[in-house]
Amino acid sequence: MTDRIYTAGLVVIGDEILSGRTHDKNIAQVASWLQVQGIRLSEVRVVPDVIERIVEAVNALREANDYLFTTGGIGPTHDDITVDAVSQALGVPVIIHPEARAILEKYYTDKGGLNEGRLRMARTPEGAELIPNRMSGAPGIRIGSIHLMAGVPHITAGMLDALTGTLKGGAPLIAETVGGFIPESEVSGLLREVEKAHENCQIGSYPFFREGRVGSNFVIRSTDPAELDACMAELCKGLEEAGFAFTPGGI
Amino acid sequence: MTDRIYTAGLVVIGDEILSGRTHDKNIAQVASWLQVQGIRLSEVRVVPDVIERIVEAVNALREANDYLFTTGGIGPTHDDITVDAVSQALGVPVIIHPEARAILEKYYTDKGGLNEGRLRMARTPEGAELIPNRMSGAPGIRIGSIHLMAGVPHITAGMLDALTGTLKGGAPLIAETVGGFIPESEVSGLLREVEKAHENCQIGSYPFFREGRVGSNFVIRSTDPAELDACMAELCKGLEEAGFAFTPGGI
């Protein structure tokens, strides 16, 4: 029996990533979080702060996946246009969400009160729910399968935490690693054969250079723990027969 | 007179990025390098080690941009399928590139010689040139506007270095930053007005939390140095009038 596989797309929104000014940290944290939920990150697109480009990416990835996540562009300034883009993609109007407005009014009570910019953060596509933000006032937004999150990584981390366990996923993809000072180019045939013999496993090979020496970590991924163990045993046997020292867990 | 704008797309290939195992470092380094060449990174797609998905992303981004870069999937193992995917996208056969073969033969002379896996790294789409790799044996590959680079960031860095100055670009996008312990939500109106008054400038607002305080850096980008200076002067005047302390260069 093969479990249904659940997938997600991620749209990272922001000129600052495409200019190289900011090093993205959201791809890795969303990817790791999704793994634990039993959902596979299927594709990421990084697009600029241009409404048509966001709409295009949102529509492509929401249609191809069970879930869509976005990061960035939900703050108070003129370059924060994710809510407008997602509303346009869905064909629904932008509204001021009463609950979001109440949260922001409370948050800014002792910080000068609501103003035009701050009120922008209460805007949502019509029909949306809020994702709690424990770090700062402005909430994330959920509408259907789409989740709009902050660009600042630690705020996004809090929003992911709030979403933990709320999304339906499949069997989580588990992974085991083995590594050593083994040039991947000397074991490429072995890797291919072992992967072919275990249909439900994928083997990834990740070379590195360390202490002036060449090595690799080999990662086996599967949703089936027994198959994963059998695949790992066969790979280790092959490495041993080829005369290589290796370390379970990787190096 | 408006200069022609040159754009590039980037396809990051690899299950290890989508699983969260590896934190991508290539997006930021390719983005920064392109800025210096006068080329704008227009979109990034991260896709898995699945040939159809790579073909789709390569075709979409090469058609929409002047240049296309890929990172990952050009090593010796079974999951390295970027050459196959790009050849398929272009409708050309995969060949063993004689010059690449010679490079690899020389590189592996004292490392056990060429084998089936290592010879995979001499495969290119027909009609390709090589991009020198000063770090390890296997070269990058250039075919038309497409540049296939390594997944390991320091090898990609060397390949980018080898390509410096070889691509036609436009006027580089320059940026100036000003920052302070200024909540962006208190100056969103100012930012919008200043940007509107300077057609060739974009203003980005990047909030942070530091030392228990809220602040922002404001980045103005333009290809026109004079317009950029004028825009920055007006923004600083506005911040001063609103009573905020700020630091040129950002904080």
Image: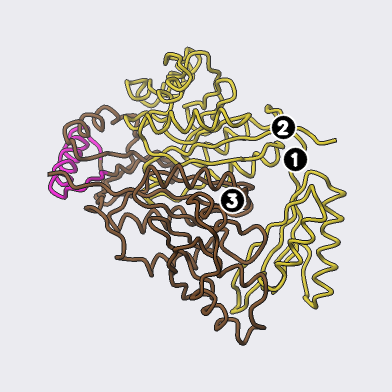
Chain colours: A yellow, B brown
What label does residue A172 carry, if any?
1
- Side of A227 relative to B79 (left or right): right
Q: Residue B25: percent from the left, percent from the top?
A: 50, 56
Q: Residue B240: percent from the left, percent from the top?
A: 19, 38
Identity of the residue drawn at 53% across and 47% down: B55
Q: Which residue is mark 3?
A: B17
Q: Which residue is mark 2?
A: A169
Residues shaded magenta: B220-244
Q: Are marks 1 and 2 on the same chain?
A: yes
As measured in the structure, the alpha-carbon distance from the residue carrying label 3 to the one carrying label 1 is 17 Å
**Label 3 crowd (10 A; few <14 / some 14-19 / many >=20):** many
Residue contact between numbered discs 1 and 2, judged by CB atoms under 8 Å: yes
- Side of B178 relative to B161 (left or right): left
Q: Nearer the viewer, residue A134 or B41?
A: B41
Q: Amino acid at mark 3?
A: Ile
Q: Amino acid at mark 1?
A: Pro
Q: Are marks 3 and 1 on the same chain?
A: no
Q: Amino acid at mark 2?
A: Gly
